[in-house]
Image (tube, rainbow, N blue to C red):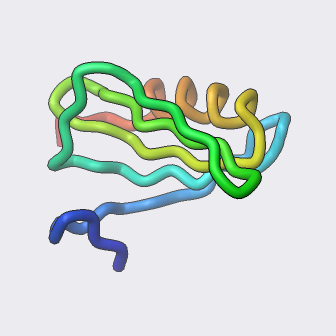
């Protein structure tokens, strides 16, 4: 189990054309806009999605961007 600020954060790996991306579903976190970062050879992004957010980490910006779009389309928050 992975926790972020005390809340369970389900996570998955999305395989993109440019590499694998680790996606954490942050159901209790809220952001007004996306935040990107790069550190130690990894690219990351925090992405708002309605009242929730995703955290994505991969080895290329293109992979993170593609995984963000797939996650936005593939995760149903209504449940």
Residue 13 falls left or right of residue 75: right
Pick whichever, 35 or 74, lies toward us.
35
Q: Nearer the viewer, residue 40 or 46?
A: 40
The x, y position of residue 67, in whole percent, is 61, 35
Residue reaching furthest bottom? 1
Query: Residue 10: percent from the left, percent from the top?
Result: 36, 62
Q: Residue furthest right?
A: 18
* Of residues 72 and 61, the one drawn nearer to the viewer in this rendering: 61
Name the image quarter holding the C terminus: top left
Residue 61, image quadrant: top right
Which residue is found at the position 23% from the left and 21% from the top?
32
Q: Among all residues in the image, which is located at the extreme front?
A: 39
Q: Relative to 75, is 40 above or below?
A: below
Q: As drawn, is 74 to the left or to the right of 9?
A: right
Task: Using residue 51 as the reference point, say whether residue 35 is left or right of it.
Answer: right
Q: Is residue 46 above or below residue 3?
A: above
Could you tell me how many numbered marks the image carries? 0
Q: Position of residue 28 (x, y in %)?
A: 15, 49
Q: Position of residue 37 (x, y in %)?
A: 55, 38
Relative horizontal placement of residue 48, taking residue 43 as reference (left or right): left
Q: Is residue 28 above or below residue 53?
A: below
Q: Residue at x 35, y 79 (%)?
A: 1
Residue at 36 percent of width and 73 percent of height: 2
């Amino acid at each position: 189990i992975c926790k972020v600020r005390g809340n369970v954060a389900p996570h998955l790996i999305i395989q993109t054309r440019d590499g694998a991306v680790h996606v954490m579903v942050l159901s209790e976190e809220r952001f007004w806009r996306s935040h990107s970062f790069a550190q130690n050879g990894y690219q990351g992004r925090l992405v708002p999605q309605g009242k929730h957010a995703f955290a994505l980490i991969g080895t290329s910006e293109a992979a993170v961007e593609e995984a963000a779009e797939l996650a936005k389309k593939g995760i149903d928050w209504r449940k």
